[in-house]
Amino acid sequence: MLNVIKIAARNLRRYLRRTILTSSLITLGVVAVLLFISVTGSFKRMMVGQITDSMIGHLQIHRKGYMASIDNLPLNRNLNQQQVAKVKEVLSGADAVESFSMRIKLGAMFSNFTETTNIRLNTVIPEQEVKTVPLLPGRIVEGQKEVLLQKGEILIPELIAKGMKVKVGDSVVLVANNKDGSVNGKTFTVSGVLEGISGPGGRDGMIHLDDAKELLRIDGVEISEIAVRLKNMDDLPRVFSSLKGEFASFTNKEGNPVFEVHTWKDLSPFYNIARMIDLMTFFIKIMLVAIVLVSIMNVMIMAVYERINEIGTIAAIGTLPGKIMALFVTEGFLLGVLGTAVGTVISLVSIAVINAAGLTFNFGRQSNLVLAPTIGAGDVISIVLIVIGIAVAASLQPAFKAARMDPIAALRHV
């Protein structure tokens, strides 16, 4: 086998220009794919981090059926005191959970005493919320960021602040219906303005959980959702599966599940963008396969055609068809190895240069976000194996054709 490799390498050096051109095409494809994966992966991680760490959390737990009617923000689907206690017990015993935050979500009427509009409210315990979504203070575009909220204060969305000309320090009134249908109002002081991360139509404000209980006349404990932050985002699939199984064991009198668990993927429309990035990556890999397949097959077909007399000679002196086939397959293999080796080195150097340059970009209202492309060893190895595998596969048909040549006919070829 070592002799076959030596002869294959010698044949590639004989046609050096063609070898360089083919390996360059493979190198270009490998560089394009690895850089694309690293850059888009960096953007995807940043985007997911912005969404999960500033509003949603990694996981959320609700009462069964809440998400099906979340557009109406149903108060009759809140978790009661006993259910909240069970959730806290499970989450406190999970090593992978870093923190969790209890929220009540409700709709209300917002008035600046001259105009009225509707608003969606997330009511939180500030200390819990900051631990669970640590980027939340960064969404405050006006007002104090050091202390998220105090009782009697409200963070209003930028859309409402501009539309109703409300500033930090102004007094406003919230009017809301509780689950029994009675109406109550409460005066708040605007402590800050929130960036609408969900888009220009975002109407989500924030008040203290104690104020929400007073506004809705809630006695005891009622929670709409519990947002969960994990110590390591990579553990999300495992933790989700574990929590889903554990909460499924809690059933009501009818035997139906009491809780439902959702990941950020189920809760944010930005997951569709993440899926589009994955789809684009898949098609880029398909393009790489096509480049390698066409390049190697073209080279090997030409090699067989140009060396028909040579093939006839080595066949006539007793070289077995299997050896002839192995020779051409090895040439394709060496071309694939050469192209991927050079491409991988160039890609890793380019990624290091991009990181050293500290390139920045904007995402929504977030500015000067640093582009930090990284690529895992698994991605590099998979691309290398794909390219080499396709290079070998592309060599099979020309190699099989060379191995089946009749020595006499091959020697007569001009």
Image (spheres, rainbow, N blue to C red):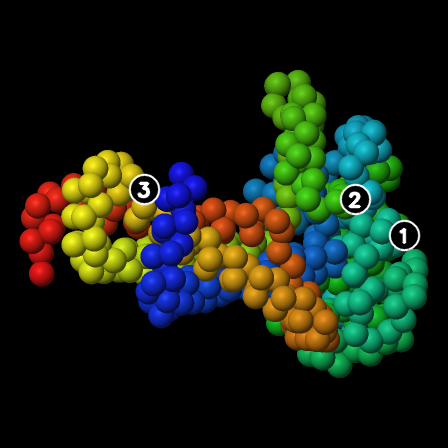
Q: Residue furthest front?
A: 317
Q: Secondary structure at mark 2?
A: loop
Mark nearer the N terminus (3 vs 2):
2
Would you place residue 109 above or below residue 261 in this image? below
Q: Residue at x 11, y 43 (%)?
A: 406
Tell me if residue 75 can be seen. Answer: no
In front of the other: label 1 or label 3?
3
Distance, label 1 to label 2, CA atoms, is: 17 Å
Q: Residue at x 74, y 59 (%)?
A: 54
Distance, label 3 to label 2, CA atoms, is: 51 Å
Would you place residue 133 above or below residue 93 in this image? below
Question: Pointer 1: what residue?
Answer: 127
Q: Residue at x 9, y 61 (%)?
A: 414
Three-letter amino acid code of the residue under disc 1:
Glu
Q: Are marks 3 and 2 in contact (CB under 8 Å)?
A: no
Mark nearer the N terminus (1 vs 3):
1
Question: Pointer 3: what residue?
Answer: 326
Three-letter amino acid code of the residue under disc 3:
Ala
Please state, as top left, top right, bottom left or bottom right, where the N terminus lies in the image: top left
Question: Pointer 2: what residue?
Answer: 231
Q: Are marks 1 and 2 in contact (CB under 8 Å)?
A: no
Three-letter amino acid code of the residue under disc 2:
Lys
Residue 194, percent from left and from top: 76, 69
Distance, label 1 to label 3, CA atoms, is: 68 Å
Q: Secondary structure at mark 1?
A: helix
Q: Secondary structure at mark 3?
A: helix
Tell me if residue 101 can be seen. Answer: yes
Would you place residue 39 above or below residue 57 in this image? below
Bin the neighbour count of mark 2 within 10 Å (Cα to Cα): few under 14, some 14-19, many 20 and up: few
